[in-house]
Structures are given as structure tokens and as C-alpha cells.
Image: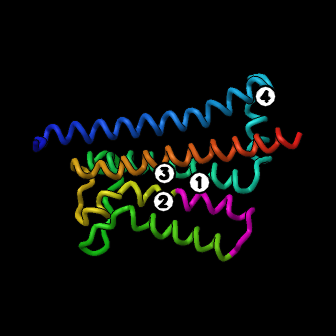
């Protein structure tokens, strides 16, 4: 049985809401779990100082993963908000053009990711990787936000097919948050086993 356009749109929305739920659940578990554990150990008053110390005391790989997660989520949200403002013609921002060609934000995203990834490979220093995770995550968010455009090879950003970018971004947020949770759980398990 063929599905009507309305049924297809409804299915796309449902998938997107499920992915948004998974992204929110994984992110809330990551952040909320850390804050609850912190409040139990230190009390709510010293939470900021303890969070700062926890960030600093993590391994270089944990810090890089957290920076990647934070920059991806922040950039994904900003990209969605800015494109909505541009589309609504609110504020000073407009689409970027080089000559008569519209430059989509996946272009600087590819550049950011390639530069950060290449620098990480070239430098091979864990301390630097945690800082290169910021531009890498931001670039990845800019690319995945326009995944539908890259797959369809036409400007489908604001169409029903364009929701693929949102879905890819939400799925990536879920995976990054889950990966961060697993890394932290393994580290705590190792510490408990060594004690």
C-alpha cells in the first residue's frame, strides 16, 4: 500500500521526535548523572568548583570527547537558529554568496573538520587534541546539519526531505553522549577495580 504525502510527513516527524527524545535522554543522562553524583559527593554548594576540577582532572581523551560533544551540540543549535533567522529575514544575517553561487554552511564545516583532524594527526599530542576537538565538532555539526542537501544534491534544507539533516544531527548527539557515558563508566569501573 502506497503512503500518502501526509502519511510520509507524519512518519518523518515521528522519527525526528524519537531521535530528539534519544538525544535529549542521552544528553540528560550524561549531564544529569554527573551532576547528581557530584551533589552526592560534594554537596550542591561546591558544584561549579568541582565541575571545573572534574573537567581538568579527566584524561585527555575524555576531555577531547566532552569538548567534541559540547561544540557539536552548540554549533548544531546555533546553525539551526541562524538559518531559521535568515529564512525569516530577521536580523542582519543573510545567505553567503560567492559570485552567483550560494555557499552552504557545510562548506566551512568540511574545512574546519579537515583542518582540525589533519592538525591532530600531524601534531600527535593528546593535550592539543582536546582543543582541536572544538573546531572538529563544530565542523561536523555544520556538515551533518546539511546532510539532506549532500544526499539529495539539491537544496532541500526547508523541505520534508531536509529533515534528514536534523535527524543526522540528533542521532550524532545521542551517539556522542552515549559514548561519553560509556567512557566515563569504564574509567570509574577501572578505578573501582584497582582500589
Which marked residue is nearer to the observer: mark 2 or mark 4? 2
Q: Quadrant of residue 132?
A: bottom right
Of marks 4 and 3, which one's residue comes earlier in the chain?
Answer: 4
Task: Give residue 136's mark.
Answer: none
Q: Is residue 38 shown above or below 20?
A: above
Between the residue at mark 3 and the residue at mark 1, the CA separation in whole angstroms equals 10 Å
Of marks 4 and 1, which one's residue comes earlier in the chain?
Answer: 4
Of marks 1 and 2, which one's residue comes earlier in the chain?
Answer: 1
| Figure quadrant of the C terminus | top right
Instruction: Tell me whether circle 1 and circle 2 mark residues in contact (CB < 8 Å).
Output: yes
Between the residue at mark 4 and the residue at mark 3, the CA separation in whole angstroms equals 29 Å
Question: What percent of the width, then of the height, locates residue 14?
Answer: 30, 36
Residue 129 is inside the magenta segment = yes
Location of mark 4 (residue): 46
Question: What percent of the width, then of the height, locates residue 72?
Answer: 52, 51
Q: How crowded is mark 4: few (under 14 residues within 10 Å), some or many (20 or more)?
A: few
Instruction: Tell me whether circle 2 and circle 4 mark residues in contact (CB < 8 Å).
Output: no
Q: What stretch is highlighted in magenta?
A: 123-137
Q: Residues within 10 Å of mark 3 (few under 14, many from 20)?
A: many
Location of mark 2 (residue): 140
Location of mark 3 (residue): 75
Location of mark 1 (residue): 68
Between the residue at mark 4 and the residue at mark 1, the CA separation in whole angstroms equals 26 Å
Amino acid at each position: 500500500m502506497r503512503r500518502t504525502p501526509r502519511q510520509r510527513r507524519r512518519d518523518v516527524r515521528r522519527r525526528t521526535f524519537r531521535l530528539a527524545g534519544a538525544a535529549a535522554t542521552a544528553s540528560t543522562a550524561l549531564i544529569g548523572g554527573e551532576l547528581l553524583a557530584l551533589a552526592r559527593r560534594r554537596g550542591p554548594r561546591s558544584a561549579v568548583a568541582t565541575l571545573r576540577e572534574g573537567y581538568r582532572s579527566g584524561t585527555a581523551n575524555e576531555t577531547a570527547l566532552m569538548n567534541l560533544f559540547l561544540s557539536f551540540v552548540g554549533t548544531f543549535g546555533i546553525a539551526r537558529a541562524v538559518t531559521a533567522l535568515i529564512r525569516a529575514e530577521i536580523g542582519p544575517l543573510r545567505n553567503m554568496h560567492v559570485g552567483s553561487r550560494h555557499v552552504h554552511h557545510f562548506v566551512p564545516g568540511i574545512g574546519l573538520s579537515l583542518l582540525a583532524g589533519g592538525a591532530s594527526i600531524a601534531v600527535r599530542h593528546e593535550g592539543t587534541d582536546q582543543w582541536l576537538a572544538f573546531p572538529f565538532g563544530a565542523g561536523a555539526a555544520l556538515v551533518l546539519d546539511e546532510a539532506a542537501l549532500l544526499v539529495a544534491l539539491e537544496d532541500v534544507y526547508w523541505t520534508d526531505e531536509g529533515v534528514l539533516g536534523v535527524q543526522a544531527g540528533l542521532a550524532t548527539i545521542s551517539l556522542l553522549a552515549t559514548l561519553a557515558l560509556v567512557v566515563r563508566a569504564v574509567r570509574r569501573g577501572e578505578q573501582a577495580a584497582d582500589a
